Image (tube, rainbow, N blue to C red):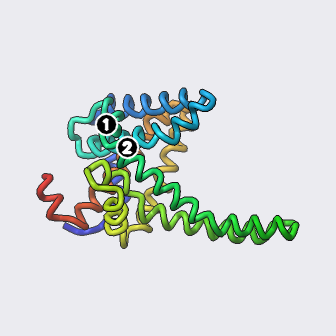
């Protein structure tokens, strides 16, 4: 088996996963969207929700996407299975917050210096803001598979370590897959907005498929055991 990650295959897996289990794929994503949308409109509760509930719901969405990619009896209720690993998903979420803040340090430095100098335009902020963006993209590509690994039983620290390993050598392809998924979602939004609920699950399954392939490349003995 060639250890090549194909964007076309991942997107094809996304489409096939949707076709095979459209009810679970669309239904699960709609449930997730409605809960997040409604909670977002409730003052104070929305902040608490994002900090304490969203991590588990996103984890459930990852579990659903893995089951869809594998055609492993996916169901709408998978969206809530993230609460079974609540502590791990919450820990991964907060570690990502720390990573995000660290990546923004150059931007904060630029803002501070330009504010102190009263610089117009804020040249240093723009330059260091770009540096922060590049560092953030690199970090996200390195650890983009953390939630899938937590969904499959890894501890938070183990998930970050394994994500770094399985994405090594493939981060450029993962970046391009992210762009393709973004374009798929934009295309869905252009279809009266409702196409989003078809496009988003396709993108979600496509990325889960990429994770499954990458994990198989890095840990073939584990993949063989699961088959």
Label 1 belongs to which residue?
A: 81
Q: Does 63 sit left or right of 99 as displayed?
A: left
Q: Of label 2 and label 1, which has the lower sequence position?
A: 2
Kindly report the distance in space between the C-alpha atoms of the residues bearing marks 2 and 1. Answer: 8 Å
Q: Residue at x 34, y 66 (%)?
A: 161
Q: How many marks?
A: 2
Badge 2 crowding class, 10 Å Cα cut-off, few under 14, some 14 to 19, many 20 or more, is many
Residue 199 rendering spot, x and y as whole percentages = 45, 40
Q: Are marks 2 and 1 in contact (CB under 8 Å)?
A: yes
Q: Does 56 sit left or right of 127 as displayed?
A: left
In this picture, is 36 found above or below 140? above
Image quarter (top left, top right, bottom left or bottom right) of the N terminus:
bottom left
Residue nearest the observer in this picture, 208 or 50 = 50
Q: Residue at x 36, y 71 (%)?
A: 168
Q: Does 187 sit left or right of 202 as displayed?
A: right
Residue 155 rendering spot, x and y as whole percentages = 30, 55
Residue 8, image quadrant: bottom left
Residue 149 rendering spot, x and y as whole percentages = 31, 54
Q: Is residue 92 visible?
A: yes
Label 2 belongs to which residue?
A: 59
Q: Does 7 sit left or right of 66 as displayed?
A: right
Q: Is residue 9 visible?
A: no
Badge 1 crowding class, 10 Å Cα cut-off, few under 14, some 14 to 19, many 20 or more, is some
Residue 18, image quadrant: top left
Q: Residue at x 21, y 65 (%)?
A: 219
For label 1, the SS is helix
Q: Residue at x 11, y 56 (%)?
A: 225
Residue 163 got which mark? none
For label 2, the SS is helix
Residue 65 rendering spot, x and y as whole percentages = 33, 43
């Amino acid at each position: 088996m060639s250890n090549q990650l194909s964007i076309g295959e991942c997107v094809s897996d996304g489409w096939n996963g949707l076709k095979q289990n459209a009810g679970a794929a669309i239904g699960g994503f709609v449930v997730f969207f409605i809960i997040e949308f409604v909670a977002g409109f409730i003052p104070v509760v929305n902040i608490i929700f994002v900090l304490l509930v969203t991590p588990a719901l996103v984890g459930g969405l990852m579990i659903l996407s893995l089951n869809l990619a594998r055609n492993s009896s996916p169901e709408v209720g998978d969206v809530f299975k993230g609460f079974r690993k609540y502590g791990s998903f919450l820990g991964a979420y907060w570690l990502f917050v720390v990573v995000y803040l660290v990546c923004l340090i150059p931007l904060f430095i630029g803002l501070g210096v330009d504010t102190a100098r009263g610089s117009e335009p804020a040249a240093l902020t723009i330059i260091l803001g770009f540096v922060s963006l590049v560092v953030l993209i690199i970090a996200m590509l390195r650890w983009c598979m953390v939630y899938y690994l937590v969904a499959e039983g890894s501890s938070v620290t183990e998930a970050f370590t394994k994500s770094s390993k399985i994405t090594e050598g493939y981060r450029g392809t993962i970046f391009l897959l992210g762009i393709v998924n973004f374009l798929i979602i934009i295309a869905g939004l252009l279809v009266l907005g409702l196409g989003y609920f078809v496009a988003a699950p396709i993108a979600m399954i496509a990325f889960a498929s990429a994770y499954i392939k990458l994990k198989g490349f890095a840990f073939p003995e584990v993949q063989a055991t699961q088959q």
